[in-house]
Image (cartoon, rainbow, N blue to C red):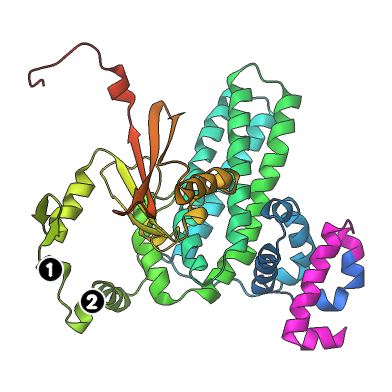
């Protein structure tokens, strides 16, 4: 076994072999006994990397998600000996950790209410717990894209799938509590849900965040901090001890190009369009003021642009620009997205249309194939609109109203 431990490549293959043994049906204890020496110094990066490689080698994300807790159980003893992330108030990781602590207390209060059959209190605590949704959204739309820029996609896909399981559990529990709940049926839903949430706390704190701290640069963490307020926080607000003022100033200059004396976009020339001439600023304002959300994906399935309107329907952050569109959707809906792209690219269709009801709103979603003058596929345009008020219109209005 020593040659596996001393050679990094062979060691990684041995660790993948350990996980394959679990997927083949061996128990945690059997694996621990057989590979004790190999498992004693496994770190967060090791686990994240081997899960990433297993996905790249063809193992389905759903299978890894199903056994994710088992993976952690095998490596837990080693993970608990590693040094915890050293962060300060204001750093994105510090904020993520603070949200986990607060969500854990809400989860405890919900468990206590259910145990006492205090259904009114249980409903209130579940509503409070569901505010934690924004924590998942910030990871999915900001942190994960930055990790993916480093070629790190497997763990984020697995975690997003687990997020969706938790969301489904919240909905199921809310439905039960809204009716005539009984202790047994509520416990049957709540207990695995609570376990999944707590296990995700552990995976984030011992695998995701240590891995991200090792992978991402200070500049990238600064960008994550800058993009996070648009998505929002739950239970806490970031502190102001990070980044240091001089670091923030340097990062801001680097992002705008001002440090090198570059000409800002405000001084750029006019752009000549088919039916007019506009400055880049005017184009940006027009797109920003449209009463719809627009996202453009190029011919290589890369997100190139999204409009930043006053009220977004679905969460977006600048981190998704440059990201493959397949990574911007939950694993459960990926097949539908891929089918649309494949049909557009093959010329089988030019438009796809959906409508859903969400949080009391009626949302209309359309996808359009973008083609050049010869009809060759150049990309996809996604247009999303809240049409609740439009659907309610009746009669006519020919004069300006209040």
Q: Do we see residue 242 in this rendering?
A: no
Frontmost residue, 171 versus 354? 354
Classify 122 as above or below 370: above
Q: Whole-percent x and y of residue 22?
A: 84, 60
- The picture quadrant where one finds residue 227 is bottom left
Classify 217 as above or below 121: below
- Residue 21 within the segment the image draws in magenta: yes
> What residue is shown at x 84% (from left), y 88% (from top)?
3
State how far apart marks 2 and 1 are (Cα).
14 Å
Frontmost residue, 354 versus 178? 354
Q: Is residue 265 left or right of residue 5?
A: left
Mark 1 = which residue?
A: 268
Query: Which label sits in the foreground, 2 or 1?
Result: 1
What secondary structure is found at the residue carrying circle 1?
A: loop
Q: Which stretch appears magenta?
A: 1-30
Classify 265 as above or below 400: below
- Residue 56 within the segment the image draws in magenta: no
Mark 2 = which residue?
A: 257
Residue that sits furthest to the front in the current view: 374
Q: Whole-percent x and y of residue 226?
A: 34, 62
């Amino acid at each position: 076994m020593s040659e596996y431990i001393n050679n990094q490549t062979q060691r990684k293959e041995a660790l993948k072999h350990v996980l394959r043994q679990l997927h083949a049906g061996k128990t945690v204890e059997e694996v621990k006994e057989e590979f004790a020496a190999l498992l004693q110094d496994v770190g967060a990066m090791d686990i994240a990397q081997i899960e990433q490689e297993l996905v790249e080698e063809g193992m389905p994300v759903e299978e890894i998600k199903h056994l994710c807790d088992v993976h952690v159980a095998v490596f837990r003893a080693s993970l608990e000996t590693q040094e915890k992330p050293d962060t300060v108030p204001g750093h994105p990781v510090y904020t993520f950790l603070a949200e986990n602590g607060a969500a854990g207390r809400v989860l405890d209060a919900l468990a206590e209410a259910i145990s006492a059959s205090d259904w009114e209190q249980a409903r209130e605590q579940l509503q409070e717990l569901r505010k934690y949704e924004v924590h998942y959204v910030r990871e999915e739309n900001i942190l994960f894209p930055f990790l993916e820029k480093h070629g790190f996609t497997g763990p984020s896909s697995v975690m997003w799938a687990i997020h969706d399981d938790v969301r489904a559990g919240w909905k199921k529990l809310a439905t039960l509590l809204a009716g005539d709940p009984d202790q047994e049926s509520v416990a049957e839903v709540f207990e695995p849900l609570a376990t999944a949430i707590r296990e995700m706390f552990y995976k984030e704190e011992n695998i995701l965040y240590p891995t991200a701290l090792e992978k991402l640069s200070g500049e990238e963490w600064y960008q994550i901090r800058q993009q996070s307020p648009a998505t929002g926080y739950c239970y806490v607000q970031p502190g102001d001890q990070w980044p240091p003022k001089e670091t923030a100033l340097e990062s801001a200059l680097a992002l705008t190009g001002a440090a090198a004396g570059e000409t800002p976009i405000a001084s750029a020339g006019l752009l000549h369009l088919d039916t007019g001439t506009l400055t880049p600023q005017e184009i940006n304002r027009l797109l920003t003021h449209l009463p719809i959300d627009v996202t453009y994906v190029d011919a290589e399935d890369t997100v190139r642009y999204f409009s930043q309107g006053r009220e977004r329907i679905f969460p977006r952050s600048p981190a998704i620009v440059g990201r493959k569109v397949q990574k911007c959707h939950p694993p459960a809906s990926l097949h539908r997205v891929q089918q649309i792209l494949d049909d557009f690219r093959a010329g089988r269709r030019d438009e796809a249309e959906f409508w859903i009801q969400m949080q009391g709103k009626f949302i209309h979603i359309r996808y359009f194939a973008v083609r050049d003058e010869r009809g060759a596929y150049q990309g996809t345009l996604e247009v999303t609109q809240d049409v609740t008020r439009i659907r309610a219109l009746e009669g006519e209005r020919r004069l300006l109203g209040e």
